[in-house]
Amino acid sequence: MSTVALWYALPLIVSVSLVCAATRHELMRPIMQHAVRFGAWVAAFMAVFMGLLALLGRLA
């Protein structure tokens, strides 16, 4: 996978995080705090999953 294609994940993570946080909170400060935490969680999950796929690709 090209590293250029990974840049498409950034707007996806930002938009999903903001929508998820906005459905749970009404004020801007809690929305942004929740969005940052959720975005970090999603990015970490994607990094671990990509690492596992890379490892499986090397083993195959």
Image (cartoon, helix red, strand yellow):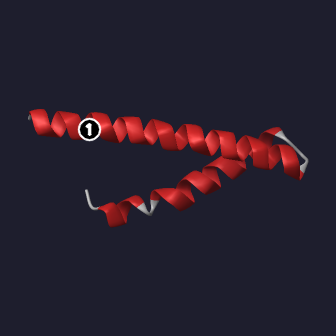
Query: Can residue 20 be seen at all in this image of the molecule?
Result: no
Q: Quadrant of residue 50?
A: top left
Seen from the viewer's position, the closer of residues 47 and 8 is 47
Q: In the displayed structure, does residue 35 sit left or right of residue 47?
A: right
| Tag 1 secondary structure | helix
Q: In the displayed structure, does residue 20 sit left or right of residue 24?
A: left
Query: Can residue 14 be seen at all in this image of the molecule?
Result: yes
Q: Where is residue 53 in the image (x, y as percent from the top left)?
A: 26, 38
Q: What residue type is labelled 1?
A: Leu
Which residue is found at the position 54% from the left and 41% from the top?
Answer: 42
User: Which quadrant holds the N terminus?
Assistant: bottom left
Q: Position of residue 57 (x, y in %)?
A: 16, 39
Which residue is found at the position 84% from the left and 43% from the top?
Answer: 30
Q: Name the residue under label 1.
A: 53
Q: How many marks?
A: 1
Seen from the viewer's position, the closer of residues 59 and 21 is 59
Q: Where is residue 40 in the image (x, y as percent from the top left)?
A: 58, 42
